[in-house]
Image (cartoon, grey):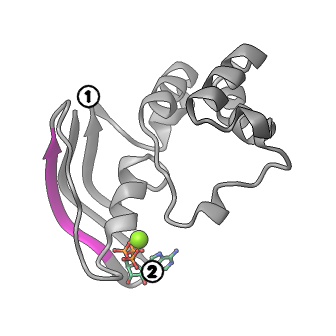
Amino acid sequence: MIELKNLSYRYGENHALKDINLTVNKGEKIVILGVNGSGKSTLLKVINGLIFPEKGEYLYKGRKITKKAFRDRDFAKSFRKEVVLLFQNPDNMLFNPTVYDEIAFGLRQLGIEDKDRIKIWAGRLKIDHLL
Ligand SMILES: Nc1ncnc2c1ncn2[C@@H]1O[C@H](COP(=O)(O)OP(=O)(O)OP(=O)(O)O)[C@@H](O)[C@H]1O
Ligand SMILES: [Mg+2]
């Protein structure tokens, strides 16, 4: 499902990822472990299609993930629906003025916002009283 081949990424002169090879199969759960600054978040951002490698490639379900691939709206929508990154610091993720808007935000991006759906998810998380 996820395949990284000889992938490298750098911030200026700083090589955050060097020649990474990784395969993750469907249904597999993995842990990425490493010291501070070893490149875990960078790796996750690449897998999430938020930044793009300078060398090597990233294939998701066999499709090469590049900046250009996201110009295909259908692909961009399906990828964003399937591949999700929760940021390390929740304060960077929660930026809407209300709980309702916060839940609605993701659905709105996917064009599937509706009140019932928001209520269902709030209920599953037991935060419907906050809506
Ligand atoms: N936006 C950035 N600009 C420049 N350098 C960066 C940036 N983000 C990360 N780096 C550098 O890239 C390297 C990898 O950082 P990264 O955040 O991926 O590590 P990490 O394993 O997630 O660390 P932590 O355990 O602290 O979360 C580090 O040397 C870091 O200083
Ligand atoms: Mg990190």
Q: Is residue 24 visible?
A: yes
Q: Is residue 26 above or below residue 47?
A: above
Q: CA distance from mark 2 to mark 1?
A: 30 Å
Q: Residue at x 15, y 35 (%)?
A: 25
Instruction: Give the residue displayed 14% in from the left and 45% down from the top.
Output: 23
Whether the magenta-drawn stretch holds residue 23 is answered as yes
Q: Quadrant of residue 39?
A: bottom left
Occupied quadrant, residue 91: bottom right
First to last magenta residue range: 16-24
| Disc 2 Cβ-to-ligand 1 distance below 8 Å | yes
Q: Is residue 39 above or below residue 96?
A: below
Around disc 1, counting alpha carbons within 10 Å, would you say few (fewer than 14), some (14 to 19), or many (20 or more)?
few
Image point (48%, 23%), residue name: 78
Residue 61 disc label: 1
- The residue where tag 2 is placed is 12
Comes first in the chain, label 2 or label 1: 2
Q: Residue furthest right?
A: 97
Residues 114 and 59: in front is 114
In the image, 81 versus 73, the foreground residue is 81
Q: Disc 2 on helix, strand or loop?
A: loop
Residue 100 x, y percent position in the rendering: 79, 36
Q: Secondary structure at mark 1?
A: loop
Picture quarter with the C terminus: top right
In the image, what residue type sits under mark 1?
A: Lys
Q: Tell me the chief SS of the magenta region.
A: strand
